Image (cartoon, rainbow, N blue to C red):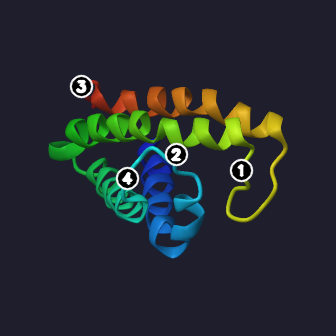
Amino acid sequence: MWKWLVVPFFVIGGALHFILPDAYIAMMPSWLPAHAALVAISGVAEIAGGLGLILPATRRLAAWGLIALLVAVFPANVNVAVHHLPLAGHDIPAWALWARLPLQAALVAWVYRFTLPSRS
């Protein structure tokens, strides 16, 4: 059941890296190199991870990959909050930018469920 909420969340999120790359590039901390390449790589990883959750044979590996990705992109989310950057060209209240940070932990917990042995 959860799978069919998580899969589109990550597949669509990954596709947006290619549809709106400038929005993701704008989030990147200045100390990271090759912003466009990192956005493309993270988009592919997000799509692959989301699709990987579908099949039992790839589910656990995909979940661990998504967890690693969520940890890897956390600095970009911190960068947005610290510098109060607009998201996709929209000015977001500072409190909302900071509130997004704990949501990363919730996403990790959500995906972690897929690393556990199936009960079915």
Q: 10 Å neighbourhood of mark 1: few (<14), some, or many (≥20)?
A: some
Mark 4 against mark 3, which lies toward the viewer?
A: 4
Outermost residue to the left: 57
Q: 10 Å neighbourhood of mark 3: few (<14), some, or many (≥20)?
A: few
Q: Position of residue 100 (x, y in %)?
A: 66, 36
Q: Quadrant of residue 68?
A: top left
Are discs 4 and 1 less than 8 Å apart at CB? Answer: no
Q: 10 Å neighbourhood of mark 2: few (<14), some, or many (≥20)?
A: some
Give the residue at mark 1. Answer: 85
Residue at image location 52% in from the left, 45% down from the top:
29
Q: Which mark is residue 29?
A: 2
Examine the rendered structure and indicate whether residue 39 appears above or below residue 111: below
Q: Secondary structure at mark 4?
A: loop
Q: Earlier in the sequence, mark 4 or mark 1?
A: 4
Q: Position of residue 21 (x, y in %)?
A: 51, 69
- What amino acid is at disc 4? Pro
Q: Quadrant of residue 97?
A: top right
Q: CA distance from mark 4 to mark 1?
A: 19 Å
Mark 3 against mark 1, which lies toward the viewer?
A: 1
Residue at image location 72% in from the left, 32% down from the top:
98
- What amino acid is at disc 3? Pro
Q: Earlier in the sequence, mark 4 or mark 3?
A: 4
Q: Position of residue 88 (x, y in %)?
A: 68, 63
Residue at image location 78% in from the left, 38% down from the top:
96
Give the residue at mark 3. Answer: 117
Q: Which mark is residue 33?
A: 4
